[in-house]
Image (spheres, rainbow, N blue to C red):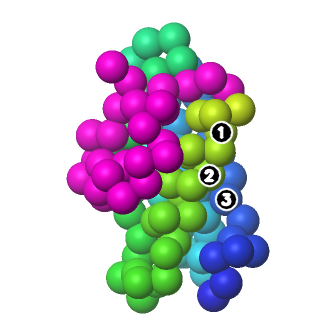
Amino acid sequence: MDTATLEIEREDHEHGGRYVARLAPGAEAELTYRKTGEHVLAVDHTYTPPPFRGRDVALSLVKRLIADARQNGDRIVPICPYVAVQFRRHPEWSELLAQ
């Protein structure tokens, strides 16, 4: 699997949403978030099915989140431990952290 060509969709609704990558029939990776204010997203969960772990699928979901946040003027509260670790590893994202 090449994460450079991984198709990620954003499903947005009134109170939150998710980013999803359909990896195989019946296998999805996802990153979920809640809207906690105007332009504030609390990212609360990421999941990659075990057979697809170690391939940077979850990181691809986070990078899509980051790109969308920059484009839309959103700020992020990284509740999910994986997302919090990625923010520490990528200090260039720090301007997107909600205060």
Q: Nearer the viewer, mark 3 or mark 2?
A: 2
Tell me the residue at 52%/72% (across/down): 57
Please say whether residue 57 is one of the residues in the magenta stretch: no
Q: Which residue is mark 2?
A: 64
The magenta stretch is 72-99
Q: Quadrant of the C terminus?
A: top left
Tell me the residue at 59%/34% (across/down): 69
Q: Where in the figure is residue 86, as x and y percent of width and height?
A: 37, 56
Name the amino acid, label 3: Ile
- Left or right: 1 with respect to 92? right
Name the secondary structure under disc 1: helix
Which one is nearer the viewer's eye here, 26 or 30? 30
Cβ–Cβ under 8 Å for marks 2 and 1: yes
Q: Nearer the viewer, mark 3 or mark 1?
A: 1
Q: CA distance from mark 3 to mark 2?
A: 8 Å
> Quarter of the image holding residue 41?
top left
Sequence-first tag of 3 and 2:
3
Which one is nearer the viewer's eye here, 40 or 14? 40
Q: CA distance from mark 2 to mark 1?
A: 6 Å
Which mark, residue 68?
A: 1
Name the amino acid, label 2: Arg
Mark 3, other Cα within 10 Å: few <14 / some 14–19 / many ≥20: some
Which one is nearer the viewer's eye here, 5 or 86? 86
Cβ–Cβ under 8 Å for marks 3 and 2: yes
